[in-house]
Amino acid sequence: MTVPDDVVAAASRAWNWVPPNATKVETDEYLLLRMPEWFGIGLELMRLDPVRPVDVVVDEVLGHAREFGLPEVNCWVKLHNDPSLHDVFQQRGGVLDETLDVFALDLAPGAPDLGVPGSLELRWATDLDTMRDNLLVAAEVFGDSMPPEDELLAEVERAQQDAVAGSGSVVAYLDGVAVGCGGLSLVDGVARLWGGAVREDARSRGAYRAVLDARLRRGLERGATMALVKGRIQTSGPILRRAGFEVYGQERSYLVPL
């Protein structure tokens, strides 16, 4: 079945990820994040809901962004934003950085058959070794660095707490080597699927499907009625479509110089 557009739009709008160590500049109109040092992108405008004229609000945000002393800020145009916002960021020198499709899947019929290869082993990252593997794969694919050891330990502690509610990250292993990972957050009946990544030399061997399958099944076990993914068009997109996900629009980010 198809999930109604307004349901997907509301769930997408409510999804704003804030890392535990991020510094927030937040008002009712925007959410600007200074990401932890080990993230590949230092500054992100995660949410923009202007009440005042959009030019005024954007310039205010850029003023706050300059206070962090970084060369650029990554500004997102979300599914619910007015399309004119693309022009606003481009007028300030913004260069398109990433385009994501917003995918949703009705989970009422159950999980799709993804044909997961039996050669892959799946482990949820609730111990130090698996968490390290999880973050190593993600860092390699997304261009981040590894966090310090004390942050790894903190991640494990948070993961153990999240596991009680069913949320967490799962890692795929091939011949004992971590090759893929992906995260799951359960919020108000929505299985938010994030951070899906597979090492380049292990692609086309079923790792993404295995990670996707594990997260969908855990979401169903915990009562999720819809899965939501913001996926890269050329990598995860084709797999998600084959799994039955439908596209509801796109989100784009612009690197705006400071």
Image (cartoon, helix red, strand yellow):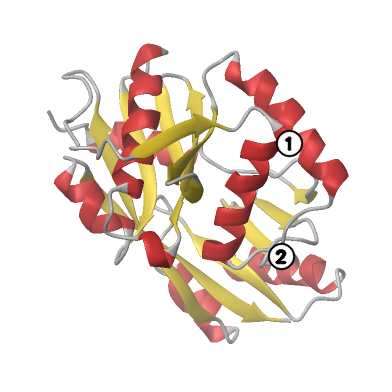
Callout 1 amino acid: Glu
- In the image, which is nearer the foreground, mark 1 or mark 2? 1
Residue 43 is marked as: 2
Q: Residue at x 31, y 27 (%)?
A: 226
Quadrant of the image occupied by residue 220: top left
Residue 23 is tagged as none
Which amino acid, mark 2? Leu
Q: Is residue 214 visible?
A: yes
> Front-most of 41 and 46?
41
Q: CA distance from mark 1 to mark 2?
A: 21 Å
Q: Count how many numbered circles sit on residues in the image.
A: 2
In the image, is residue 219 above or below residue 141? Answer: above
Please report whichever mark, 1 or 2, sits nearer to the chain's N-terminal start: 2
Q: Nearer the viewer, residue 239 or 199?
A: 199
Could you say where residue 187 lies in the image, as x and y percent from the top left? 50, 24
Choose between 24 and 227: the one closer to the eye: 227
**Residue 213 percent location from the top left of the image:** 31, 33
Q: Is residue 137 left or right of residue 212?
A: right
The image quarter in which residue 145 lies: bottom right
